[in-house]
């Protein structure tokens, strides 16, 4: 119980990666069933499994997100320093009314990840992962409400299809106990699951708002975001215990993923991030077949097909999706002929 408390406390300070690693540690035998994770973590799941020893972890997985946060802060600081040496220097807003906004995502993640732990006390992991796909739809809703981004009807249909596709890939055979438990959880579990999806979407949408509200340097914004996430936890004395080369690769991968997500928030949007995360299960399936003798299921195949259709629907031009009738304009000569005949 003490372990869970330390992870929950730490998860909110660094954006929730400890919760993801906790899921890997507790349920590593199911992580390669094509389930998309909260961020672009395809390689993270594979490396996390490879870092196991005799089915367990010699290191404290709550320390990995902290070191990944240090890595992101160091890389962003170095890149910001290089930008400052150029001419003209990058734009950096140092007013307090702007800086005070950057700790807010960490506060949202703190609440979100404690809600995640509370949800897991009412539902099993399979049900929790399926409910987690609600954040795809809630991201679209908050994307529209708070950022005032208009989505077409086809794009809304594509977002719903993406949620259906990822859910289909996670559903196992209904002969298994996990299928029966999907609708047997208490109402508190479903309510907390919906709240978790809303908080996850809110954190992502608010981070995108911060990254795009001005033309500040991306690395300056990253420094502000990552600095606000540090806090000493009960795991401090176990920081490097049991670390191996594979563990450090997990740290570097997690940190690099965070930097990539910040780039997406600055120059793309939350919907692109959602699609990137969901499409990662394509490569997950292929790599898992070779690395872990994973056998693809029919549900996974159908889920991938649905996700690919959703991807095409969202990003393709409408003219590629709908056969618009050709408007035939009458030639001027026809009017002349009619006059002469009359």
Image: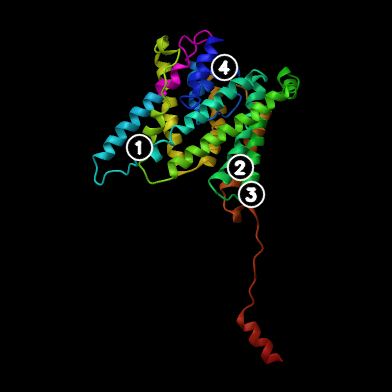
- Quarter that holds the N terminus: top right
Q: Earlier in the sequence, mark 3 or mark 4?
A: 4
**In magenta stretch: residue 53:** yes
Do the numbered discs 2 and 3 sit on residues whose CB atoms are within 8 Å?
no
Front label number (1 vs 3)? 1
Query: Which is more N-terminal, label 4 or label 2?
Result: 4
Secondary structure of the residue carrying tag 1 is: helix
Determine the CA span between mark 1 and mark 2: 29 Å
In this view of the protein, can residue 18 be seen by the observer?
yes
Q: CA distance from mark 1 to mark 3?
A: 37 Å
Q: Which mark is residue 84?
A: none
Q: How far across and down, in percent of the image, does residue 108 sit?
A: 52, 30
- Using the rendered image of the protein, determine whether residue 32 is visible from the camera's viewpoint: no
Can you tell which quarter of the image residue 33 is in?
A: top right
The CA distance from mark 3 to mark 4 is 36 Å
Q: Horizontal placement of 46 versus 84: left or right?
A: right
Which numbered marker is on residue 141?
2
Tag on residue 28?
4
Number of the label disc, if any, that sits on residue 220:
1
- Magenta: main secondary structure equals loop
């Amino acid at each position: 119980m003490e372990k869970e408390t330390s992870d929950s406390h730490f998860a909110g300070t660094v954006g929730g990666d400890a919760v993801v690693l906790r899921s890997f540690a507790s349920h590593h035998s199911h992580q390669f069933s094509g389930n998309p994770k909260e961020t672009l973590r395809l390689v993270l799941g594979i490396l996390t499994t490879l870092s196991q020893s005799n089915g367990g972890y010699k290191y404290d997985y709550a320390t990995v997100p902290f070191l990944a946060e240090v890595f992101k802060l160091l890389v962003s600081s170095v890149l910001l320093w290089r930008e400052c040496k150029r001419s003209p220097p990058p734009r950096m807003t140092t007013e307090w009314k702007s800086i005070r906004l950057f700790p807010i995502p960490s506060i949202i993640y703190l609440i979100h990840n404690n809600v995640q732990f509370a949800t897991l006390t009412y539902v099993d992991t399979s049900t929790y992962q399926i409910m987690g796909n609600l954040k795809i739809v809630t991201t679209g809703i908050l994307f529209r409400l708070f950022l005032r981004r208009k989505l077409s009807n086809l794009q809304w249909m594509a977002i719903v299809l993406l949620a259906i596709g990822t859910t289909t890939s996670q559903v196992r055979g209904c002969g298994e106990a996990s299928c029966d438990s999907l609708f047997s959880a208490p109402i508190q579990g479903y309510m907390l699951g919906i709240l978790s999806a809303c908080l996850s979407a809110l954190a992502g949408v608010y981070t995108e708002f911060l990254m795009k509200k001005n033309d500040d340097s991306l690395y300056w914004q990253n420094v502000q975001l990552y600095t606000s996430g540090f806090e000493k936890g009960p795991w401090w004395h176990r920081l490097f215990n049991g670390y191996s080369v594979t563990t450090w690769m997990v740290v570097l991968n997690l940190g690099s993923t965070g930097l990539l997500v910040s780039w997406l928030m600055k120059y793309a949007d939350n919907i692109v991030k959602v699609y990137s995360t969901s499409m990662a299960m394509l490569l997950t399936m292929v790599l898992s077949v070779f690395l872990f003798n994973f056998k693809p299921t029919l549900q996974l195949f159908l889920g991938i097909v649905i996700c690919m259709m959703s991807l095409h629907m969202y990003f393709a031009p409408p003219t590629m999706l709908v056969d618009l009738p050709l408007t035939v304009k009458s030639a001027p000569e026809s009017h002349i002929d009619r006059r002469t005949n009359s």
